[in-house]
Every structure is written in structure tokens, then in C-alpha cells.
């Protein structure tokens, strides 16, 4: 049985824990709602450090390590730019590393960090702490770093699955009760509602779903109320999935892999979600080298992935992470799931986006991406593109057919221009709508 006396010598303040970091160290932290903000704030308050690398994926919090004043002391590195880290990445004050999410735990094992900082739930009676809302690469980080610092937070849900670390694996423990960051509900307008309805029409009873965060995934979930026995195998889930579980729409009964379980790598939502997953064996948290591995996903029959993007060209090449050459986010699990879903028996991979951006002034469907644009999902992988105007099926279609289908779901204000570009590319006219 676990006794508190076992950890007495490890208990420190955030400042004392941060004092263990040395100049030149590489520090990896938990991500998303699991970012150990108190530890990072204490690290950034140190003025004596030089050339410390801080690495994590998504954050919902402020990022003092991306402030211009951090230059020379701390430099951020990521595979995914977030609201508070994006400017530093775009201005070259922080680094961006291209990496599929499912490969990240392997990358961490191949290049072990000096320090891992994570948030965990309090130890149970056997001394095990759950990584809670962010398991993804955190387990690999804890198991490989030379020094492990844990923020034990009694507001961190004790999620279940392959997500436990033992107090013996922790070198420093900072006990502190702190609310987790919560995601405000997305604004769903008529465009998102229409996209949700088109996606729902592509989803059948018994399918297993992957969805991301934001207005489009939420709108899709709102359109699924009359489906039966849906399953979840998803990099992340939010409150919309809880709603469908409670209404009996998501049962995971028909899953061919992990039946009866929602398999997830991280969670972002409201306290309602965090309370729902606490000690709940229906939700199984696992690292991304399982959840996002395309070979694992492919074993799930009728797997449907739904992801969003910023721009698609008429060949079907998808930019999801950059506007031109400016990094906006990252590949995340998009390609992992598109490949897995495409290989799954009965699977479908959906890219869903509004037809325009910048308050309707730009078409997201373009003849060509700009010079140097980052392609996230190659035309060889893309399957279906959905806008508020309908569904463009691209898999197995010729270049001409793809361009025709995409123009048919572009915003009407941009179709004439796109038809002109089609004529220039393919030497034939497209009939008007
Ligand atoms: N050209 C110029 N600007 C564009 C644009 C384009 N083609 N497309 C979008 N923008 C602008 C928007 O107008 C918006 O700007 P604003 O905030 O000033 O209005 C901004 O870029 C963000 O666009 P939006 O569509 O609102 O982004 P989002 O928050 O819905 O996120 C993705 C969409 C694609 C960036 C996001 O889903 C992502 O990062 N995907 C990749 C990772 C992934 O799919 N992971 C798997 C699931 S977890």
C-alpha cells in the first residue's frame, strides 16, 4: 500500500523543482490541458539559465517561454503552433519540427530529453498516478527523461488505460490544486451546420469516428443524434462526444478493435468532460503510438476520420497547418488518421472546411497553392472534401474529375474564376452550374 512517507523526500515547491533544470537542458512537458503551467512559469522566472529548450505540442495557456524577453534563456520547439506560441514560431523566435503525431513517442525515445515535466492525478492506494487528460507522448517522456518533475493536481481526473506512472518514477513532486484549462464552446453558424449535415450523411450506424476540436467537429457531432452504435477511436475528444455517449448514440459496441471502449490520447473540454472521464473505464487513454498509428487505425473496420483544413487546390492537395509558408498549427494526427481510415475496411477519410476564409473574401478552394506552401495531406491520401455546398469525392478520380468535383463545392462567388483556371489547366470548358 502507498504511504505518503514514501514521497516526503520528493515534495518540493515549483521554484525548487525548476531549480533542478540546468543551462543547456532539453525539457519536454505534457501538452494541451495537461501543460504543467506552474512548473513552466517557475522555469521562465529563472534569469540565470542559458539555452534551455522547452518542447511540447498544443497549449491552451500563455507561453512565457515564447516571449521576446526569453531569448537566450529558453527557446521553444514544437510540432504544433498554438494561439500563444504561433507568433514566436512565425517570427523565427521558436522552432518548428515536422513530425507525424504517431511518431512522436518514438522520436522522444530516440532523442531522450534531460527533463520531463508533467501534470498527474494524486497517487492511488498503490502509488500510481494517472497522466489524466494528456497521455499522447507524456508516458514516453516520463520513461526516458533523466529527471522527472510531476505537478500532482487533485483536479486532474484519474483517467484509465495505458496512462499510469508510479511515484517511484518521479524525482520531484509539486503538490498544487489548480483548475484545468477549459475550452469555451465553439460558435456554430449556418455554414458549420451545413457541413455537419453533409458529413453526417457520410456516416453510417456502427461506424467508428475520429474528430478534432472546433466548430466543424462540434457541428458534425450535433448532426449525429439519430445514429446508432457509433464508436470512438480518436486522438482527442471534447464535450460533444460526452453528449452522444450519454444519449446512447456512442456505444462502441460495433468496434472491431477495442470494442466497448472509447480509445483516446488526449482530452480538451469543460469540467463536465474532465468529470466524465474520471475513473471511467468506458474511456481508455493510450499513447499516440497506439491511438494514431495508421496500422492500428486500419484494423478498425468502418473507421471514419473527420479533419479540417485551411486550403485545398484543384489537384486535391490539402494545406491544413500553414497559410502559405506561415505556420499556423501542425499536422497533428490528420495524416495518421486519413491514412488509417483509408486503409480500414469500409473506412472513409473526410476533410471538412468552410468554402471561404477571411469573412468570405478568400476561397479555400484554389487553382494552385502559393509558392512554398506547406502541403499537409498529399493528393494521394485525400479521399473526400466537404464544404457547406456538398461533398467532393476525390478517391480514385482523375485530375480532371477532382477539379470538377472541387469547383462544384466551392463558394458560388469564386466558381467562375475557378472555371477559368480549370480551362487554362485542362483545355476544356466546364458547364456553368
Ligand atoms: N487563406 C488565408 N487565411 C485563411 C485561410 C486561407 N486559405 N484559411 C483560413 N484562414 C484564416 C481564417 O480566416 C482564420 O483567421 P481569423 O481567425 O483571423 O478569422 C484563421 O486562418 C484560422 O482559420 P480557421 O478555419 O478558423 O481555423 P480553425 O481554428 O478552424 O482550425 C485548422 C483549422 C485546419 C487550422 C485546424 O483544424 C488544424 O490545425 N488542423 C491540422 C491538425 C489536425 O487536423 N489534427 C487532427 C485532429 S486533432
Image (cartoon, rainbow, N blue to C red):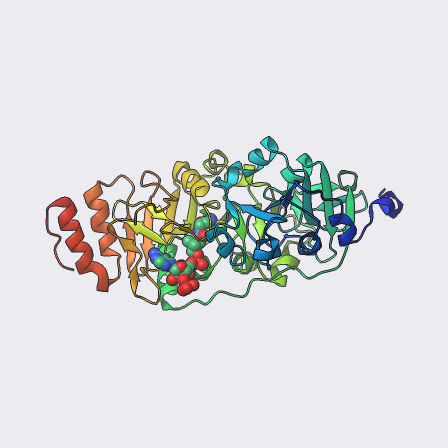
> On the image, which quarter does residue 179 sit in?
bottom right
> In the image, ligand 1 is in what quadrant?
bottom left
Q: Quadrant of the C terminus?
A: bottom left
Camera-side residue of 389 and 175: 175
Q: Nearer the viewer, residue 104 or 213?
A: 104
Of residue 144 and residue 63, the one placed in the foreground of this image is: 63
Q: Position of residue 424 (x, y in %)?
A: 14, 48
Q: Is residue 229 visible?
A: no
Say which of 71 and 19 sits in front.
Answer: 71
Q: Residue furthest right?
A: 5
Quadrant assignment, res 260? top right
Left-right relation of 297 to 126 = left
State the image coordinates of residue 135 (x, y, percent, origin top left): 62, 45
Residue pictured at 45% horizontal, 42% vertical:
337
The spot of residue 62 in percent (x, y) is 59, 60
**Above or below, comparing residue 414 to residue 299 in the picture:** below
- Viewed as shown, does residue 132 lie left or right of 374? right
Query: Farthest residue toward the top?
Result: 110
- What residue is drawn where x is 34% and y is 43%? 382
The percent coordinates of residue 408 (x first, y second) are 22, 55
Q: Is residue 191 visible?
A: yes
Decide: is 273 above or below 299.
below
Numbered-mark total? 0
Quadrant showing the N terminus: top right
Amino acid at each position: 500500500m502507498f504511504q505518503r512517507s514514501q514521497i516526503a523526500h520528493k515534495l518540493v515547491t515549483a521554484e525548487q523543482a525548476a531549480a533542478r533544470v540546468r543551462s543547456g537542458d532539453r525539457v519536454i512537458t505534457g501538452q494541451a490541458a495537461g501543460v504543467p503551467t506552474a512548473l513552466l512559469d517557475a522555469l521562465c522566472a529563472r534569469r540565470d539559465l542559458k539555452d534551455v529548450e522547452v518542447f511540447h505540442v498544443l497549449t491552451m495557456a500563455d507561453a512565457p517561454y515564447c516571449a521576446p524577453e526569453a531569448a537566450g534563456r529558453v527557446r521553444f520547439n514544437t510540432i504544433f503552433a498554438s494561439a500563444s506560441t504561433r507568433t514566436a514560431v512565425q517570427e523565427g523566435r521558436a522552432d518548428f519540427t515536422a513530425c507525424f503525431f504517431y511518431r512522436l513517442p518514438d522520436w522522444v525515445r530516440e532523442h531522450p530529453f534531460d527533463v520531463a515535466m508533467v501534470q498527474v492525478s494524486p497517487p492511488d492506494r498503490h502509488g500510481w498516478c494517472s497522466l489524466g487528460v494528456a497521455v499522447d507522448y507524456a508516458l514516453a517522456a516520463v520513461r526516458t527523461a533523466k529527471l522527472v518533475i510531476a505537478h500532482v493536481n487533485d483536479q486532474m481526473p484519474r483517467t484509465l488505460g495505458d496512462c499510469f506512472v508510479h511515484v517511484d518514477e518521479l524525482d520531484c513532486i509539486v503538490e498544487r490544486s489548480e483548475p484545468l484549462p477549459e475550452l469555451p464552446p465553439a460558435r456554430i453558424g449556418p455554414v458549420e451546420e451545413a457541413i455537419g449535415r453533409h458529413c453526417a450523411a457520410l456516416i453510417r450506424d456502427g461506424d467508428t469516428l475520429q474528430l478534432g476540436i472546433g466548430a466543424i467537429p462540434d457541428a458534425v457531432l450535433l448532426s449525429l443524434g439519430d445514429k446508432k452504435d457509433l464508436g470512438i477511436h480518436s486522438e482527442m475528444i471534447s464535450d460533444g462526444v460526452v453528449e452522444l455517449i450519454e444519449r446512447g448514440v456512442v456505444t462502441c459496441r460495433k468496434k472491431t478493435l477495442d470494442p466497448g471502449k472509447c480509445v483516446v490520447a488526449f482530452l480538451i473540454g469543460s469540467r463536465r468532460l474532465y468529470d466524465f472521464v474520471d475513473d471511467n473505464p468506458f474511456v481508455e487513454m493510450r499513447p499516440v503510438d497506439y491511438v494514431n498509428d495508421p496500422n492500428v487505425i486500419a484494423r478498425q473496420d468502418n473507421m471514419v476520420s473527420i479533419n479540417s483544413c485551411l486550403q485545398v487546390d484543384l489537384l486535391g492537395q490539402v494545406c491544413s497547418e500553414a497559410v502559405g509558408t506561415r505556420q499556423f498549427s501542425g499536422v497533428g494526427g490528420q495524416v495518421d488518421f486519413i491514412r488509417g481510415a483509408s486503409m480500414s475496411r469500409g473506412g472513409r477519410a473526410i476533410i471538412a472546411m468552410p468554402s471561404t476564409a477571411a469573412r468570405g473574401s478568400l476561397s479555400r478552394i484554389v487553382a494552385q497553392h502559393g509558392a512554398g506552401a506547406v502541403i499537409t495531406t498529399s493528393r494521394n491520401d485525400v479521399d473526400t472534401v466537404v464544404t457547406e455546398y456538398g461533398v467532393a469525392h476525390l478517391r480514385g478520380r482523375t485530375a480532371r474529375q477532382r477539379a470538377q468535383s472541387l469547383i462544384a463545392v466551392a463558394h458560388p462567388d469564386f466558381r467562375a474564376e475557378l472555371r477559368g483556371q480549370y480551362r487554362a489547366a485542362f483545355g476544356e470548358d466546364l458547364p456553368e452550374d
